[in-house]
Amino acid sequence: MSIEKIVEQALQDGYLTPAMEAEVGRICDTASELSIEEYMALDRLMGALLTGEVVAVPRKQFINVMEELVLTEAIARVAEIEATSDRTLDLGDIAAYALNRLPPLYATTEEGANYQRSRAKEELHVLIAQCVSEAIATNLDRPEFFPERQALGKNNSKEEVLTQVSALLQAYAPAYEAGHAR
C-alpha cells in the first residue's frame, strides 16, 4: 500500500493503526527518495495528527494473559526436556500450538490481568498443561527434514549457488536433463 493510500485511509477512518504506521515507516526506510506527492501526504497526515482529526492507536491497549501463562508452562517443560536429552525444541512453535487450542484471556488493566491470571490458575491450569504437553509431543514427533541443508546466503559465490541448485535438481529431478534433451 502506498503512503498516499495509507494517509487517505487514516483520514477516512480517523485512526492511524500500528500496522499503517509500520507500513509508512517501512516505505520511508526502503525508498531512496520520496516523491513530492508522498511528502505532501505525510505533511497532511502530520497536520491531521496534530489537530486530532486522526488519532494514532497505541501499539497495545490490551494483553492476553493466556500468552504469559502458556509461555511460563512451556519454558519450564522445554527446559526440563532439553536438560535431560539431546533434543532442541522450538518454544515459539510449542506456544503457538497450545495457544491455538486455548481460550484467550484479554485484559486492559493490571487489575483485569490479575483477575484473569487467578481465574486461569484455578480453572484452566490442567487444560494449559495438557495443551502444552500435546504441543511438545507434536514437536518431538516432527521429523527433522533435510538436516544437511544449507541456506543460500549472500556470501555464496555464483559457483557455490549453481552447485547447490544443480545438486537439488539432481536429487529431485534426475531424469530432467535426459527427458529435456529429446
Image (tube, rainbow, N blue to C red):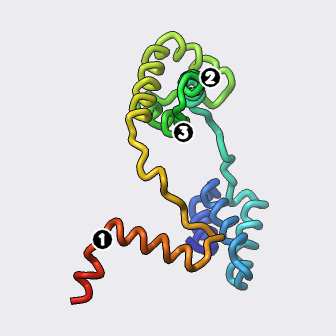
Which kind of residue does numbered mark 2 sit on? Gly
| SS label for mark 2 | helix
Q: Determine whether 147 is above or below 38 in the image.
A: above
Q: Is residue 134 visible?
A: yes
Picture quarter containing residue 83? Answer: top right
Nearer to us: label 1 or label 2:
1
Nearer to us: label 2 or label 3:
3
| SS label for mark 1 | loop
Closer-to-camera residue (44/117): 117
Image marks 2 and 3: residues in contact by CB distance under 8 Å: no
Label 3 environment density (alpha carbons within 10 Å; few <14, some 14–19, many ≥20): few
Residue drawn at point x = 62 percent, y = 58 percent: 14
Residue drawn at point x = 72 percent, y = 64 percent: 48
Which kind of residue does numbered mark 1 sit on? Ala
Image quarter of the N terminus: bottom right
Q: Determine whether 144 is above or below 66 in the image.
A: below
139 displayed left or right of 17: left
Q: Position of residue 75 (x, y in %)?
A: 59, 27
Q: Is residue 66 visible?
A: no
Residue that mark 1 sits on? 173
| SS label for mark 3 | helix
Label 1 environment density (alpha carbons within 10 Å; few <14, some 14–19, many ≥20): few
Nearer to us: label 1 or label 3:
1
Image quarter of the C terminus: bottom left
Which kind of residue does numbered mark 3 sit on? Gly
Residue drawn at point x = 74 percent, y = 82 percent: 33
Marks 1/3: CA–CA distance: 34 Å
Residue that mark 2 sits on? 112
Closer-to-camera residue (166/65): 166
Q: Determine whether 135 is above or below 169 in the image.
A: above
Picture quarter containing residue 112? Answer: top right
